[in-house]
Amino acid sequence: MTSVLLIATLLGSVWLTRQLASLVVFFRKPAPRWGLVAFGGLAVIIGSGVAFDRADQAACDEGLKELEMSVGRPPAQPTNQAHATTDTGSRVVLQEPIEARDTRDLAGPNCGPCGSPRTTTR
């Protein structure tokens, strides 16, 4: 209720009306108008640069995640189910993965056009 009364009081104020009218008159002059246009253009350039940087960072993170999944080793722990030694008799610690990778994660990327699987003809 208070906010409605505050808005009604401000909109009915002669002082606020005079200030808005002088602001409109100020921005009708060429210098402030083109200054505002230049500021808007600069804001668009900076905003597009930030948006591009965020999209590029997300694409790089996704590519690194896929690379890590295909080349990296899964988390492993030593196993006692089997033993191995070298030819000189030194013990080799065998490890097994803590959990198996999901087959969807192991599937390679689609290499064909438009995301279709690559096909070979002979």
Image (tube, helix red, strand yellow):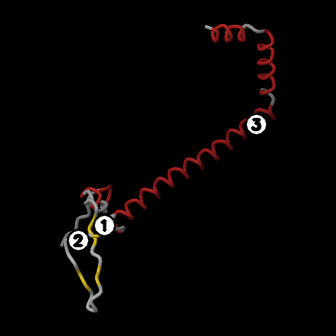
Along the line of sight, the residue nearer the viewer: 2 or 112:
2
Seen at 72% across and 40% down, the residue is: 39
Looking at the rendering, in which quadrant would you find the N terminus? top right
The residue carrying mark 1 is 77
Looking at the rendering, in which quadrant would you find the C terminus? bottom left
Along the line of sight, the residue nearer the viewer: 96 or 12:
96
The amino acid pointed to by label 1 is Gln
Pick whichever of labels 3 and 1 is earlier in the sequence.
3
The amino acid pointed to by label 2 is Asn
Q: CA distance from mark 3 to mark 1?
A: 67 Å
- Measured as percent of width and height from the top left, residue 30 is found at 80, 32
User: Does 114 appear above or below 33?
Assistant: below
Residue 111 badge: none
The residue carrying mark 3 is 34
Between disc 3 and disc 1, the foreground one is 1
Pick whichever of labels 3 and 2 is earlier in the sequence.
3
Between disc 2 and disc 1, the foreground one is 2
The residue carrying mark 2 is 80
User: Does 18 appear above or below 99?
Assistant: above
